[in-house]
């Protein structure tokens, strides 16, 4: 009798909680719906594009891929190399909206690397930064990050101000919340037409997926 009584209490409560969570999920909307020309078409699940999201490739390219990646991720490094080849072979065909998720913790947490990436994007040098960050993905210490900043000729004062004003951390937190909402389990994770796809491991695979 006691077990039946508990079931009568908890099962309806669980169902109500699940329904509330489902409603909140389907009501999720972009926070900046009119602030960027790279908005995706309205679908059942619209992934918001933020003004501070780095864009790799031609902003007017017809095919848009959304990438959740981390500078310390080996798989992301491989994909970055593939995308370099893809962009060279098919210029102006594909653009990548890059959303950083700081996942790696060893040998250095990648949070600081993402902050530097955010600030490099503010100076229109994200692609240059990301290439060197992935090259040094196994050693993203502050010393290495400062070396990369000098290599790509970031303005030192603007970089220091950007790192200190808290906007990079706020942007990272927003991406983390979005990752949770999308139930992203690992990086790299890619979305095409608002649908998650399995990333190919060869250039020809990406060409097939993207219809190139």
Image (spheres, rainbow, N blue to C red):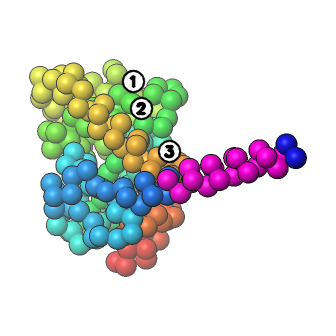
Nearest the camera: 6 or 152?
A: 6
Where's residue 75, x and y in %? 50, 49
* Residue 192 visible in the current orientation: no
Q: Earlier in the sequence, mark 3 or mark 2?
A: 3
Q: At numbered mark 1, what does the secondary structure look like: helix, strand or loop?
A: loop
Q: Residues within 10 Å of mark 2 (few under 14, many from 20)?
A: many
Q: Residues within 10 Å of mark 3 (few under 14, many from 20)?
A: some
Q: CA distance from mark 3 to mark 1?
A: 16 Å
Q: Are marks 3 and 1 in contact (CB under 8 Å)?
A: no
Q: At numbered mark 2, what does the secondary structure look like: helix, strand or loop?
A: loop
Q: Earlier in the sequence, mark 3 or mark 1?
A: 3
Tally of numbered tags? 3
Main secondary structure of the magenta stretch: helix
Residue 74: which numbered mark, if any? 3
Magenta span contains residue 10: yes
Q: Residue furthest bottom?
A: 211
Where's residue 71, x and y in %? 40, 40
> For mark 1, what is the residue?
141
Q: Which residue sits at x=16%, y=58%?
A: 34
């Amino acid at each position: 009798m006691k077990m039946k009584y508990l079931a009568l209490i908890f099962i309806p409560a669980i169902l109500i909680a699940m329904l509330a969570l489902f409603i909140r999920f389907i009501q999720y909307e972009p926070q900046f719906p009119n602030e960027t020309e790279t908005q995706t078409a309205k679908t059942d699940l619209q992934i918001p594009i933020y003004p501070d999201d780095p864009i790799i490739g031609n902003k007017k390219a017809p095919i848009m891929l959304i990438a959740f990646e981390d500078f310390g991720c080996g798989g992301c490094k491989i994909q970055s190399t593939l995308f370099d080849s893809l962009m060279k072979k098919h210029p102006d065909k594909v653009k990548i909206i890059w959303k950083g998720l700081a996942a790696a913790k060893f040998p250095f947490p990648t949070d600081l690397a993402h902050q530097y990436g955010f600030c490099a994007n503010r100076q229109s040098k994200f692609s240059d930064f990301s290439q060197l960050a992935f090259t040094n993905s196994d050693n993203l210490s502050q010393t290495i990050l400062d070396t990369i900043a000098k290599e790509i000729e970031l303005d030192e004062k603007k970089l220091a101000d950007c790192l200190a004003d808290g906007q990079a951390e706020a942007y990272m937190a927003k991406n983390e919340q979005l990752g949770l909402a999308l139930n992203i389990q690992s990086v790299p994770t890619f979305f095409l037409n608002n649908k998650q796809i399995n990333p190919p491991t060869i250039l020809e695979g990406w060409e097939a997926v993207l219809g190139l």
